[in-house]
Image (spheres, helix red, strand yellow):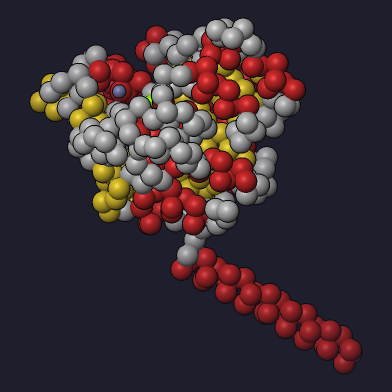
Amino acid sequence: MRNAVYKLFILIIIVLVSGCAENVGNESGRSEKKPKNIIIFIGDGMGVAQLYAGMTKSGKAFFLERFPYSGFSKTYSADAYITDSAAGGTAIACGEKTNNGMIGVRPDSTLLVSITELAHKNGLAAGVVSTSAVTHATPASFVAHNAGRGNYEEIANDFLKGTIDVFIGGGENHFRNRKDGADLTDQLKEQGFDVVYTPEDMKKSQSAKLAGLLAKEHMPKASEGRNGLLTDMTKKAIETLSRNKNGFVLLVEGSMIDWGAHENNLDYVTSETIDLDQAIGAALDFATADRNTLVFVTADHETGGLVLTGGDVKTASVEGKFAGSDHSAVMVPVFTYGPGAEKFSGIHENTFFYGEFTRLLGLKTR
Ligand code: MG
Ligand code: ZN
């Protein structure tokens, strides 16, 4: 009997001690929560007006409205007050301002190190998803190094350097229909990539390395057959990358908000913004369940100088005027959800985020 009481006493002590240890862990977690995964969304050209036009037109709450922290990003590049997507993407991906037109390199053409490369060096998985060709400026900034954003075939070569585990978007031609006659998908397969060309094959893939080349050049518009596919691409990338127990970094780009604004086509802008928000919703579902994922949403710049001149939330209608057909200099919004989200509120340079991503993930930089 005395022995049984003694055993019970020891058991209670063990339970109490382990309970305390857990509490200490939780409290230190509360003071500095750190994510294991980061999902970066870039709405190309998505200023506040593009976003609110999409919110109004959708007629229901955006997933983005669930993000607890927000701020602004100053987008000017190293050589221009108004950035392009190459310098804008490079600032977010690599943490330094460069000249317009440059991908993953400094103005003197020396190489920068992107957050996906740092993640890879530290044993995390990395991926990019876009509705444009994956070789286009925004996704390319996270993968490639090239002084000229138009060198698509050279940029495609950089996808073979082993830092990216998943890429899904358009751009098949830059891998398979090249001036040098090479078919880069042969090398991708040798490296263990499952190379797929249709959404159906993408969904079926069980490979830890996935190359989805879902269009010869860019994918169709959301309003012309792509509707919902960015969400499926995002889900597949998350599913594939999350096999890596060390964590992952994923870029998802809504490429065509910018293109709609260049065309001064407000319906094009709103349909693409709504589509991007759906993909953000998929990431939010994952992050909510996972509790170790930071979701970061911003734009590389605003496009078109859009002003909303009228509308009605009851009828989900919106009218706007564009000041021009190119990018503008205004600050763009930033939204964050998950561990470390509070670090991003306020006004920051577009080069600020990289350092926070690196620090929060605990990545060694050398
Ligand atoms: Mg882009
Ligand atoms: Zn543009």
Residue at 46% in and 68% down? 31
Q: Nearer the viewer, residue 317 or 54?
A: 54
In percent of width and height, residue 184 lies at 64, 16
Residue at 47% in and 11% down? 217
Residue 198 sits above or below residue 290 on the image: above
Give the image quarter of residue 116. top right
Extreme-bottom residue of the structure: 2
Q: Is residue 252 in sight in this rendering?
A: no
Residue at 73% in and 26% down? 192
Q: Is residue 94 in sight in this rendering?
A: yes
Left or right for 197, reference 330? right
The quarter in which the N terminus is drawn is bottom right
Residue 236 sits above or below residue 78 on the image: above
In percent of width and height, residue 271 lies at 33, 20
In percent of width and height, residue 332 lies at 26, 39
Residue at 41% in and 23% down? 149
In percent of width and height, residue 364 lies at 57, 55
Extreme-front residue of the structure: 108
Give the image quarter of residue 97. top left
